[in-house]
Structure formats: C-alpha cells, structure tokens
Amino acid sequence: MKFRSAALTDIGKTRSENEDRFLCNDELGLFGVADGIGGLPGGGEAAERTVQEVTRILQQGGEIDLVALTQTVSRSVQELGQEINPPYGIGTTLTFGLLKNGQLQLAHVGDSRAYVLQKGDFLGLTEDHTVENEARHLRARGEYVSVTAENRNALTRCIGQPGLPEVDFQEFIVTKGDRYFFTTDGICRMISDEELAEILAGPESPAEMLKLVIDLALKRGGHDNLTAVLVFVDEA
C-alpha cells in the first residue's frame, strides 16, 4: 500500500494542558489518537504512556493481536496510575488502526473516533463508549435505564482503569482513494460529521485539511484539546 498521512494537535482555547496524543507512523502503518481523561490527574501521562507502549510493541514485529495489545497497554497505564494517583488511577481513550496487507485493523476504547471517506460516503467506524450509548443498547433489550444530562457523556470504558477493558475490534478492506480520519472528541463536539465530510473531500493535502479542521474548531471556541490524524490511501 501507498499512503500519505499527517497529524495535528492543538491545546485549544480553554485548557491549561494538552492531554491528547497521536499515533502517526507511516513505517508501521500505525495511526490513531489517545485523549487523556480530564476528570482525573495524569491524563496527559496516561495518553503518553499509551502511545509509547502501542508503538513499542508494534516495533517488535511479528503477528499482533490488537485486542491483546490494547489490554497489555491498559495494564501498563494502570501501573503508572498507581504511582501518579493511587486512589483513583489515571485513564485515556485509545482509537487506532494498523494499515497492513490491504486491510485496516481497528481497535477502539472510549469516545475518540475513526471515520473513513470512501467513494463519496463518510462513514463512522466506531461508537462512543458513553453512558448514553450504553443506556440505548440496554433499552433496546427491554431494560429501563435512566440517563441524566450530567452523566450522559461519561465514559463506560477507558485505558488504564482496573480490569481488562473490552476492546472493539474490526477489520476493513482498504481501497484506493480511502481517507481515514482519527479524532478526539474536542473536534467532534465542535464540527458535525457533515462538515467534516465536506472538508475531507477537498483537494488539499492531509496536512492542509487538518489545519482547516483545527482552525474551524478553534473558531467555534476550542473548548477542549484538538487532535486529529488523516491518512490518504493512494494505492491499496
């Protein structure tokens, strides 16, 4: 496969620290984002340990199970959390893909997102692991669940907390012309899917497109850290 990629992050206009991190490694075909949980101390450290460990393990080569890898990374972050914040630990989201042998392997925990622009269609590849979405699934099974405005966006899964996180794993066939977009929720809350689709369908390079996305989110307030990774597949 041949592809072009870019990554861009910005602290935004209201945060005192950028707790987002990204993965953008053409040699490994590794792309994604991690968003440290702001309600706990050490969000930036959690995200940093996560991207470091994902990269380190993949650099070892060989066949990789992304679910097992993600759970191994979570244990490492949990250990770090016992040093930084023993009572409650630390946490981060993690959404990342591995482009290899004509496929995208995608692993996802939390509320960061992955999308693809493919043959004119802009498709979400992940579902946010939030109280609101969990309640929706339970209601579909006939269970009554109450969700408040205060907790509807709270995460139900993350990297770094006790136990092994449930990891969403998917595989996709990659086609020439695909554009894969990984983003933290600071962008998704500022820009609609329809607007993202319009920007990502443009003629600009990956780096230029990401600047357009970040600039728009900043223009609308930049209430959170803003991070995105974009990959153009030029040859599948």
Image: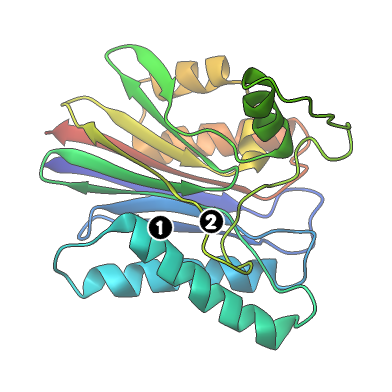
Q: Nearer the viewer, mark 2 or mark 1?
A: 2
Residue 121 in the image: state x and y as whole percent.
36, 13
The N terminus: image quadrant = top left
**Camera sees residue 218:** yes
Within-10-Å neighbours for mark 1: few <14, some 14–19, many 20+: many
Residue placed under numbered mark 1 in the picture: 23
Residue 117 in the image: state x and y as whole percent.
35, 22
> Could you tell me which residue is drawn at 77 percent across and 66 percent down?
40
Q: How many labels does the image show?
A: 2
The image quadrant of residue 205 is: top left
The C terminus: image quadrant = top left
Residue 9 in the image: state x and y as whole percent.
56, 52
Residue 4 in the image: state x and y as whole percent.
25, 42
Relative to 66, 223 lies left or right: right
Whether the residues at callouts 2 and 1 have beta carbons within 8 Å, the answer is yes
Up-down: is 75 above or below 220? below
Of the residues under marks 2 and 1, which one precedes in the sequence? 1
Residue placed under numbered mark 2 in the picture: 34
The Cα–Cα distance between marks 2 and 1, rounded to whole angstroms, is 8 Å
Q: Nearer the viewer, residue 210 or 30?
A: 30
Q: Which amino acid does label 2 sit on?
A: Ala
